[in-house]
Image: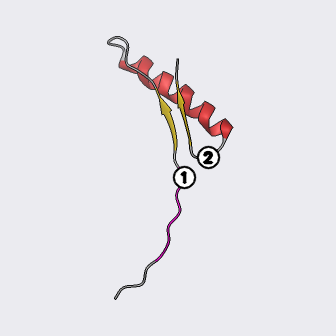
Amino acid sequence: MGKIEQLCITVSVGVAELTGDDRTELVENADQALYQVKELGRNCVVVWE
């Protein structure tokens, strides 16, 4: 049997909705949400509005 190792990870997610055809704006909005979530700490999700 192989050795079992524990791996701990955290996830922070910035989410934005595509409301038109401008994908650049979508990425910028998701980036803004991601920066907000990074300020809040780990294991968070922020939805850009």
For marks 1 and 2, give the CA distance: 6 Å
Work out whether 25 lies above or below 35.
above
Label 1 environment density (alpha carbons within 10 Å; few <14, some 14–19, many ≥20): few
At 32% from the left and 12% from the top, the residue drawn is 21
| x then y, percent, for residue 9 | 52, 57
Residue stretch in magenta: 5-10
At 45% from the left and 24% from the top, the residue drawn is 16
At 37% from the left and 13% from the top, the residue drawn is 19
Q: Sequence-wise, which precedes: disc 1 or disc 2? A: 1
Is 28 inside the magenta-drawn segment?
no
The type of colouring in the image is secondary structure
Q: Is residue 19 left or right of residue 49?
A: left
Name the secondary structure under disc 2: loop
In the picture, residue 40 is in which quadrant? top right
- Residue that carries the numbered disc 2 in the rendered image: 42
- Amino acid residing under circle 2: Arg
- Residue that carries the numbered disc 1 in the rendered image: 10
Numbered-mark total: 2
Location of the N terminus by quadrant is bottom left
Q: Are marks 1 and 2 in contact (CB under 8 Å)?
A: yes
Q: Residue furthest top?
A: 20
Name the secondary structure under disc 1: loop
